[in-house]
Amino acid sequence: MQQNNFTSIDIEEFFDSEEKKEEFSTELVVLSQNEAAVLAKLIHFLKDDAPDTLVGIMDRFADMERLVANITHFPSLLERQIIMGETRTQHTLIEGLLTHRDGDKMLHLPSKAILGKGFLVAKYHTFIAMYRIAVNAGMDPKDAQEVYNAASTILFTIMVEDVYLDLIDDQSISIDIRRQIAFSLIVLWEHRYDQNVSDVAPVLQTVWEARRNLAPAFGTMVGTSELLLISIQMDETWTAFLRERLSDKDVSQAMEEFLFGLSYEQIQTLRRILRERGIAAIGRDEISTFLEQEIKIDVASDLRDFYMQYTVRRDNARTRKRLQIQGPHNTLEDHYMRFVLERNKEKQENDSE
C-alpha cells in the first residue's frame, strides 16, 4: 500500500505542550490525509470560541498516538518473522486464514489485529464526538457533515473486517479471490486502512440512509417499491449489482432482511399470518403485535445502530450457514463487497491482456 495515502498528525502543530512526545515510527497512523484535513478545519473553528473543548479533543488524539506507539511494537504482518522458533510470513498467515474453522476465530488472529480493532473503535468514538461538538457549536453544516462522513468511513472500516472474515470462509468464492481477500485483510490489520472502503462505504451509507427514510410496505413483503426508491439514488456499481445478482435467492433474501429490518424467519412468519388471515397490509406499529415480540423497526440516525443491525444479520447468517438451514447465509454487505472485489479482479485481468 502506498504510504502517501496517510499522514501522521503532530500534536505540537495544534496546541502548545510542555511535554515532549516520544518519537516513534510506525506504518499504522492516527489519521488519513482526509481525516487530518477534517480535524484541522474543526480546530480552526474551535480555537477562539471553545479552547477548552479543543484541548479535550487533542488530548484524545494524544492518547491514540500513544496507543498506536504500543501497537507498532508488535511484529509486522507483512514481513518475515521468526516467533518462538516458528517462521511466519504473510503467505503462511494467508493460508492459515483460508483454513476453515467453525466458531469465533479471535484466538487464531494475530495480536496486532485484535489491538488495532480497538484503536479503530476509539477513533470512531472520537470522530463521532467531534461531530456532535461541531453541530452544537454551530459549525457550518457542510463542514460538520465532513466530520460525520469521516466517522462513517471509520465505522465501515470496522465492518469490512467482519465482511472479509465471512468471505474468506465462503467456499463458493474462487480460491484466487479468497486469497486476495485474505491479503486485503492483512493489509487492513497492518495499516488500519482499506482501499476498498472508499468505494463501498458511500454506497452502503446511502443505502442505509434511504432505508432509514423509507416506510416499507408490510403487505406483500416484496419490497419492490422500496428497492426502486433506493436504487434511484445509487451509482452504476450498485445498479449493476442489483441487475446481475438480485436473481440469486441468497442475495434477494439478504436484501429483504436489510429493507424490512426483520430476520428471514420473521418475514416468513409475517407472510404466513397475512396469508392465513387474508390481510392485505399492516402498519409498522403492528409488527410486534403480529409476531408477539418486541420488534425495533425504526432505524435511528446513530451510526452505531447501523452496525448493530448489521451484526444481528451477520450472526443470523452465520448460524444458518453452520446449521445448513433455509434463509440467507450471507449479509447484503457480504454480497455487495464480493461483487465489487470480483468486478475489480475482472477489470485487472482485462487491463493486463
Image: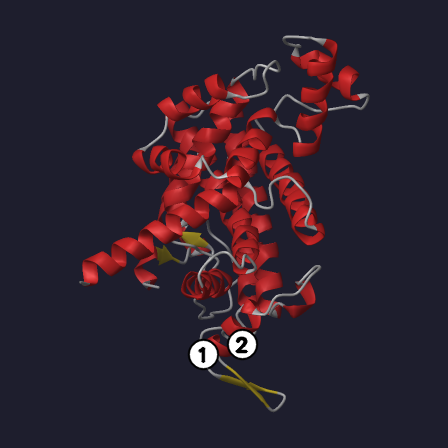
Q: Amino acid at mark 1?
A: Glu
The spot of residue 245 in percent (x, y) is 42, 39
Q: Is residue 157 above or below residue 302?
A: below
Q: Is residue 40 above or below residue 277?
A: below
Q: Looking at the rendered structure, which numbered label has been put on residue 75?
A: 2
Observer-nearest residue: 98 or 135? 98
Of the numbered discs in the image, which one, if any, rests on residue 115?
Answer: none
Residue 266 image position (x, y, % from top left): 71, 28
Q: Tell me which residue sits at (51%, 78%) in the image.
A: 92
Quarter the C terminus occupies = bottom left
Rendered view: 308 above or below 166 = above
Q: Quadrant of the N terminus?
A: bottom left
Q: Which residue is mark 1?
A: 79
Q: Residue at x 62, y 44 (%)?
A: 314
Query: Which of these two is toward me, 104 or 76?
Result: 104
Left or right: 268 with respect to 66?
Answer: right
Q: Can I make out residue 291 in this image? A: yes
Q: Give the image quarter of residue 83.
A: bottom right
Q: Nearer the viewer, residue 8 or 53?
A: 8
Helix, strand or loop at label 2? It is loop
- Callout 2 amino acid: Pro
- Residue 190, image x, y percentages: 48, 65
- Residue 219 image-quadrant placement: top right
Q: Quadrant of residue 38?
A: top left
Give the CA separation, mark 1 to mark 2: 8 Å
Question: Is residue 237 shown left or right of residue 221?
Answer: left
Residue 119 x/y as whole percent: 57, 55
- The residue most toward the bottom is 85
Mark 1 vs 2: CB contact within 8 A? yes
